[in-house]
Image (cartoon, rainbow, N blue to C red):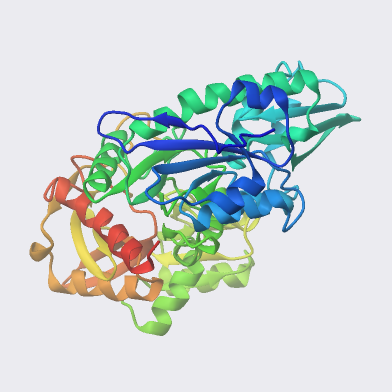
Amino acid sequence: MISPNGPKTVILKLKGMPVYKTLIVVDTEDTSLIEQFPNVISFETYLHEFPKRNEPKTRIINLCDTRTYLSKGYYCSLLAEARNHLVLPSVKTINQLRQTSDENISWLPQQLSKMSAIQGAISTWICFGQSSEAGLESVAEKLFKQFPAPILKLVVSDEDGHWYASIERGAFSDLGAEARQQCLAHLSHFTQTVWRIHERKKRHRWDMAILVNPQESVPPSSKEAIARFVKAAHKLGIEAHTVTPEELTNLAYFDALFIRETTAIDHHTYQLANKAEQLGLVVMDDAQSILRCCNKVYLHDAFSYQGVPSLRTDVVMDASIATLQELEDKFGYPLVLKMPEGSFSRGVFKVKDRAELRDKLEVLLADSALVLAQEYLYTDYDWRIGVLNGRAIYACRYLMARNHWQIYNHGAKRFVSGGFETLPTFEVPKRVLDAALRASKIIGQGLYGVDVKEVNGRAYVLEVNDNPSIDHKVEDAYLGDELYMQIMGEFHRRLEARGR
């Protein structure tokens, strides 16, 4: 019988940390489980005898069958959450597994196809992120991170070179004798090491994912800047974790998403921003800002409609002789052609004659139905005004790259970008600051970098960047660590306004 006189409990006490009691809840009796773990109780016991007065902090490992909605396993996790017990799996995880689609595990077939050791059809159990199937160790760990449940069943098959996979919940009672022994070993390891390790970490009020891509040649923030974001977040009670797109498998774990990877609409950054917002996370860049900033056609139209001062621009649909003539008459040479979607000066060309105009137009129109043609206005530098929630927080003058007409020269082997000068915002000409704030207001209330040219006493907004560069010793050269504190402070303000 299961603990007839009430459960014995495993107490974990670490210096400076609260005392924890771990209970393992089951819906069927199993001698091997009871013999190895004295803290096993039935669902009925958990239902009727808990919570107890003055009990220590309690953690529940729910080994009941959770596959059926409103089953004992479902209610075990639901009651645990109502009783402020830390439970594995959570109700959210149970529901995620009930509604798992190919989209949720779209990464799995691709990863399996790269594993030469995996062949044919396989059905295997994953217990606490561990698999006994050779070659599936990394897959098991990743699935457990995405769906943190004690027992998962993974079924994969290879049909004519195409991999198919499914994942579903499992219960301890489903396991055969050998699988049960392996699961008991993984359970012991998990309770004695994994959860203990997590206890040692200082508990923060909020968790943030900072999305980065180590493979980017020109990332929005350097490693030094990212480290300062993490430090600033920590001071405000936010535990910030840097993650790559491949690692960000369980967005629901986090309270906030800070995208520090170059964004695009047809890209995982936009997809993740959308998904994070649907889950209720505080997000920068938010999906709407990405959508608006990443397309220069939208910016041109919005600037024209809202009266934001900007360079003369036409939207071009073809490279006909009539169109070429019209552009020559309006802008003369040189003029600038821009791909609607692009960043860091990519997809931008300066053309000096009709032959070059036609050639570049045809190249750009092969990838986009619309192309922007813009007057050419040379300056020694462009202003970049950093705007956060409608307020200017930093200002830089970016000098043109050596022997080039843009800030970035992607064709150069050296001196890819020009120099810079960082100033306090109160030293920026009022017309430049006003134009930047007006332009960013059209986009939203996020974090933006507004590029502005200043010629003959007039300001011209070039574009608004939803994912502005923030590098150590560049954009933070004037404010220092205060710049990172202001940005993390905005996250903190929004998190507190949202509530838990």
Which residue is found at the position 32% from the left and 44% from the top?
Answer: 404
Q: Nearer the viewer, residue 41 or 454?
A: 41
Q: Residue furthest right?
A: 160
Q: Is 4 situated above or below 304?
A: above
Q: Position of residue 490 (x, y in %)?
A: 28, 61
| Residue 499 position within the rendered picture, expressed as x and y whole percent measured from the top left | 37, 65
Quadrant (top left/top right/bottom left/bottom right) for the C terminus:
bottom left
Residue at 48 percent of width and 24 percent of height: 192
Count all numbered tags in the image, as a single digit: 0
Image quadrant where residue 26 sits: top right
Residue 387: image location, x then y, percent: 26, 64
Q: Is residue 241 above or below residue 236?
A: above
Residue at 62% of width from left, 50% of height from top?
76
Q: Is residue 360 visible?
A: no
Please state which of residues 377 and 395 is positioned toward the viewer in this rendering.
395
Quadrant containing the N terminus is top right
- From the viewer's perspective, is 109 left or right of 349? right
Residue 29 rendering spot, x and y as whole percentages: 73, 34
Q: Nearer the viewer, residue 75 or 311?
A: 75
Q: Can residue 444 be seen at all in this image of the molecule?
A: yes
* Residue extending furthest toward the left: 427
